[in-house]
Amino acid sequence: MPGSRTGRPPVQRAAARTVPPRRPRESGPRRLRTRLQRAWDRPLTAYYLILGGSLLITVLGLVMVYSASQITALQMSLPGSYFFRKQLLAAAIGTGLLLAASRMPVKLHRALAYPLLAGAVFLMALVQVPGIGVAVNGNQNWIALGGSFQIQPSEFGKLALVLWGADLIARKQDKKLLTQWKHMLVPLVPVAFMLLGLIMLGGDMGTAIILSAILFGLLWIAGAPTRLFVGVLSVAGAIGLVLIKTSANRMGRLQCLGATEPQSGPVDCWQAVHGIYALASGGIFGSGLGASVEKWGQLPEAHTDFIFAVTGEELGLAGTLSVLGLFAALGYAGIRVAGRSEDPFVRYAAGGVTTWITAQAVINIGAVLGLLPIAGVPLPLFSYGGSALLPTMFAIGLLIAFARDEPAARAALSVRQPRFGRKRAGGAVLDRGPRRWNTMRRRASAARSSGER
């Protein structure tokens, strides 16, 4: 081969590479949709949504409880941080319950179903004993624990119905008994009606509605026939209508729907109207944290049932939409966990918890917005009240445990969580050397061990 003028061998030109055809670029909305779809399909998406969403709701709820309860505490000659400190204590205990529930195996969750149901029924019956039960705002559903601490057993009845109902339906599904309507209804519906009766003895219509929603959610997920589902719904609706008609207080709340003045004829709609006033005066970004006007004695139950109204006044539309978005993400993640699980108990329990939290949030926010009657139920994880916070955080722990239990999620967590310590073989401690944290580094070491350099 002839040399070049410089004496160097000629450079051989590389063969022309075939350039693959370029893919057409996706538009902005389509690209965003593709990325969101990929993120949603990841195995740990539901786990992070439940953990992060519940944590943000709880922390924001603590901030708003402190802001909304200061004036109420001062009016009661108490320190301004009185209600906040009690809620913070309940949140700390609830965090322990959440962590414990998230680490429990499914078998232990199922084993807790019957003891929890028996304990809830006993405490709910104990509420009606004179001298033990305490009436708050006309509803006798509380038990005094000493000092300023009280407990509402009906809140734990929601958790008991979810676990017990999920375990019952799962056992009947394993035995292929759900095709018969009597096994679908008995004993689930009679036990749920017993809990509803104990709650209604104290006059708490709001909690009874949430319990009914949990019952219907379990029946719906179990695949109850439409006629059977409609039949149970009709019976519950007829009973609820009778209870509303026979109570002047409940009829007054129903007549306050759409009210724009505090005094609409013979009905006093003070709370409903001032809740709308609080939301209307917030604007886009609110008047500022702690700057609410309605909490100065104008809005009753500002730190409990109507804390969403104070949130709208102080944080504005941006704050309320953030809260709605967090609850929507939490509910969506719960539906995903229930839909992807192959374990019947996990599917029913996750669906029951999601129904409970979503229905209670919709009823509370709908009442504040004037779209639904005021039912007197707190906003989950957000409103003041330890009796409502503790079982709800335990239920969130259940969802976290179920999200971690998915096969793909377990594999992803095992890769992300390194194992510390040394292995023992035959009683001797084996030092395996430094851990390799990088996946690419592990691949490179495997390639070198095969002789490649």
Image (cartoon, rainbow, N blue to C red):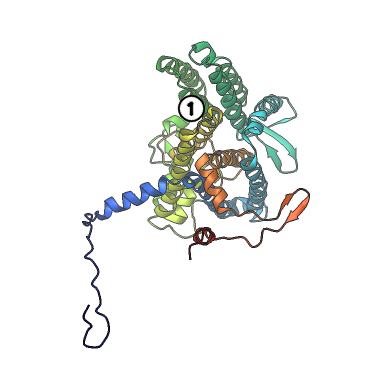
Badge 1: few (under 14), some or many (20 or more) residues near its Cα, within 10 Å?
Answer: many
Please tell me which residue lies in front, 422 or 10.
Answer: 10
Q: Residue furthest bottom?
A: 6
The amino acid type of the residue labelled 1 equals Gly
Residue 386 visible in image: no
Residue 205: % across, % down: 54, 28
Residue 185: % across, % down: 53, 15
Residue 372 visible in image: yes
Residue 369: % across, % down: 41, 41
Taking the spot 23% from the left edge, 63% from the top edge, the residue there is 17
Residue 129 shown left or right of residue 184 in the figure: right
Quadrant of image for the N terminus? bottom left
Please tell me which residue lies in front, 304 or 76.
Answer: 304
Please tell me which residue lies in front, 17 or 439.
Answer: 17
The residue pinned by badge 1 equals 217
Taking the spot 23% from the left edge, 72% from the top edge, the residue there is 13
Residue 304 shown left or right of residue 311 in the figure: right
